[in-house]
Image (spheres, grey):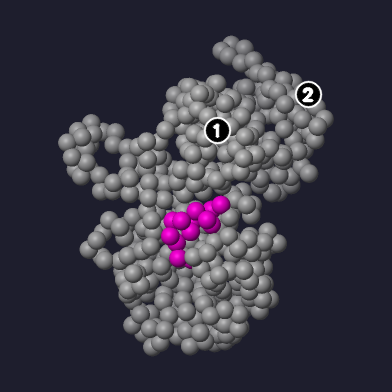
């Protein structure tokens, strides 16, 4: 398939995607995602930015050991120490790439580097040559290329290719470009860089103006052959280009004749895994992976789809791994059924962890008649909070019309019990006040989202919360059939991140 029409998928969920505040994964979770990305068929996994933290350094090492086929890539600045550290972190990778680069727009050159265009080219060339000492495959990024003047950008690209870059990344770092402008930039480089046949150009588009997918497609249609993407389009601010969107555009539009190695049937399970591990809900109307992406609700559409699905459906839901047989588990389902279903969702668990999830599953199945895939993913994720120092021991709330809501609650803090009672302007307020009485710190709830998972009054509610403490914002998550308990759990999840 390595023809001139082959598009390489470079996944940066674990690097650019993971920069979302509060959505950081631990190394075990990153390995889980990396293995799922390998099964999905991505060509390159950007595993982290090793100089940025010991956690990132370790994750790159462990991901390098865990995957076989994809190239493992590590990010650096155009700084020797960064490149040394990346090379060290990549030492176990079977196929490896160093991704180095520097800002090339006039504002980056002037304000970030207090430098000149010529000096930036020298630094770029030096970094590529230095990385080449360690690895054959070196990708160069021209940060803020979207706002870099094309003529100068062409000089940078030519110089780094001459220095040995195998891939040149043209990021629209601020998500500012219009699709035709971004496409024209790629076309200009294809036509004006004399040694362009020695490397491939990559797209890397941010979604600040909602144009990431359109810009990426425009880049590919004008000659770029690698796209940098994340699962569910996650990433800082408005995120990056969504992998699933580009993969399905290429699959659906045969006339553009661009091919990839993506096994699209793995998209939905991986989307859910990333959403669940990162506690980041996918918006219901999100293309390809949103809960409503294939739900035809209007009468006219339903009628058409029943007569012939092609009337309104451009994608067969099976092609993205939506499973009609998505089984519903009940209190009578055994360990094996729960394990099997988790594996279908891309979550592999050891026996000990499965036993804990199974116990939680039985407790939930007692409260709720059927347990579906989303519930299971929440249970698999919630289990991660088992080693929290502060836990909710019990919570009792009295509320209703015409009565003042009151709560009493007990926290288990490292094995010691602390009780409190409080009244509030609602049951959640009363319960949160109890926690605040026990954990006597300055804490402000900045964001509080309650989301039900599927439907029905017996359903589990998921709560996402942001709490500010000492000028930092901490993210927490809770899930329970009782939304007051879920809210308190989310609040305690936040507190566990700063009370040591
Ligand atoms: O958006 C960007 O410019 C980046 C680079 C570091 C590749 O993420
Ligand atoms: Zn980026």
Assess disc 1: are there few (<14), some (14-19) or many (≥20) residues with their C-alpha within 10 Å of its C-alpha.
some
Instruction: From the viewer's perspective, tell me whether residue 37 is left or right of residue 247.
Output: right
Give residue 113's quadrant in the image: bottom right
Residue at the far top in the pictured view: 402
Identified at 47% across, 73% down, the residue is 169
Residue at which label 2 appears: 419
The stretch in magenta equals 32-44
- Where is residue 148? Give x, y as percent: 46, 75
Give residue 261's quadrant in the image: bottom left
Let me know if residue 56 appears in the view.
Answer: no
Residue at the far left in the pictured view: 307
Camera-near label (2 vs 1) is: 1
Element assignment for label 2: strand
Residue at which label 1 appears: 335
407 shown above or below 303 = above
Let me know if residue 166 appears in the view.
Answer: yes
| Residue 142 among those drawn in magenta | no
Element assignment for label 1: helix
Q: Quick one: 368 or 285, which is closer to the camera?
A: 368
| Residue 39 among those drawn in magenta | yes
- Where is residue 213? Give x, y as percent: 38, 59
Q: Quick one: 410 or 192, which is closer to the camera?
A: 410
Image quadrant for the N terminus? bottom left
């Amino acid at each position: 398939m390595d023809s001139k029409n082959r598009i390489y998928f470079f996944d940066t969920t674990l690097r650019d995607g993971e920069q979302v505040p509060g959505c950081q994964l631990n190394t075990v979770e990153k390995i889980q995602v990396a293995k799922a990305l390998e099964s999905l068929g991505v060509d390159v996994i950007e595993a982290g930015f090793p100089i940025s933290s010991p956690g990132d350094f370790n994750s790159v090492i462990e991901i390098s050991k865990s995957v076989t086929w994809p190239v493992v890539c590590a990010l650096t600045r155009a700084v020797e120490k960064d490149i040394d550290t990346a090379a060290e972190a990549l030492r176990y990778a079977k196929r490896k790439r160093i991704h180095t680069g520097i800002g090339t727009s006039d504002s980056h050159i002037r304000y970030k580097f207090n430098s000149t265009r010529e000096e930036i080219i020298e630094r770029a060339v030096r970094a590529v040559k230095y990385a080449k000492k360690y690895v054959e495959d070196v990708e160069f990024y021209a940060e803020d290329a979207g706002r870099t003047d094309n003529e100068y950008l062409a000089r940078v690209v030519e110089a780094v290719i001459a220095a040995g870059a195998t891939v040149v990344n043209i990021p629209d770092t601020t998500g500012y470009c219009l699709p035709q402008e971004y496409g024209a930039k790629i076309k200009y480089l294809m036509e004006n860089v004399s040694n362009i046949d020695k490397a491939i150009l990559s797209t890397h588009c941010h979604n600040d103006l909602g144009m990431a997918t359109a810009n990426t497609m425009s880049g590919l249609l004008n000659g770029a052959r690698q796209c940098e993407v994340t699962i569910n389009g996650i990433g800082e601010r408005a995120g990056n280009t969504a992998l699933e969107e580009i993969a399905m555009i290429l699959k659906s539009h045969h006339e553009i004749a661009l091919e990839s190695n993506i096994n699209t049937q793995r998209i939905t399970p991986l989307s859910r895994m990333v959403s669940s591990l990162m506690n980041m809900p996918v918006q219901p109307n999100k293309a390809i992976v949103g809960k409503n992406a294939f739900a035809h609700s209007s009468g006219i559409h339903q009628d058409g789809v029943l007569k012939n699905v092609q009337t309104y459906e451009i994608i067969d839901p099976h092609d993205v791994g939506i499973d009609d047989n998505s089984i519903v588990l009940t209190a009578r389902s055994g360990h094996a059924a729960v394990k099997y279903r988790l594996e279908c969702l891309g979550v592999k668990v050891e026996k000990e962890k499965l036993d804990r999830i199974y116990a939680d599953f039985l407790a939930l199945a007692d409260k709720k008649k059927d347990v579906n895939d989303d519930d299971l993913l929440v249970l698999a994720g919630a289990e991660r909070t088992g080693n929290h120092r502060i836990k909710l021991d019990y919570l009792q709330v009295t509320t209703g019309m015409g009565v003042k809501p009151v709560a009493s609650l007990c926290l288990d803090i490292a094995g010691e019990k602390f009780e409190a009672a409080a009244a509030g302007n609602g049951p959640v307020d009363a319960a949160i006040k109890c926690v605040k009485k026990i954990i006597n710190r300055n804490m402000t709830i900045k964001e509080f989202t309650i989301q039900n998972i599927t439907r029905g009054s017996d359903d589990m509610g998921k709560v996402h919360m942001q709490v500010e403490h000492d000028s930092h914002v901490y993210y927490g998550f809770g899930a329970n059939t009782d939304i007051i308990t879920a809210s308190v759990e989310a609040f305690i999840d936040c507190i566990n991140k700063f009370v040591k």
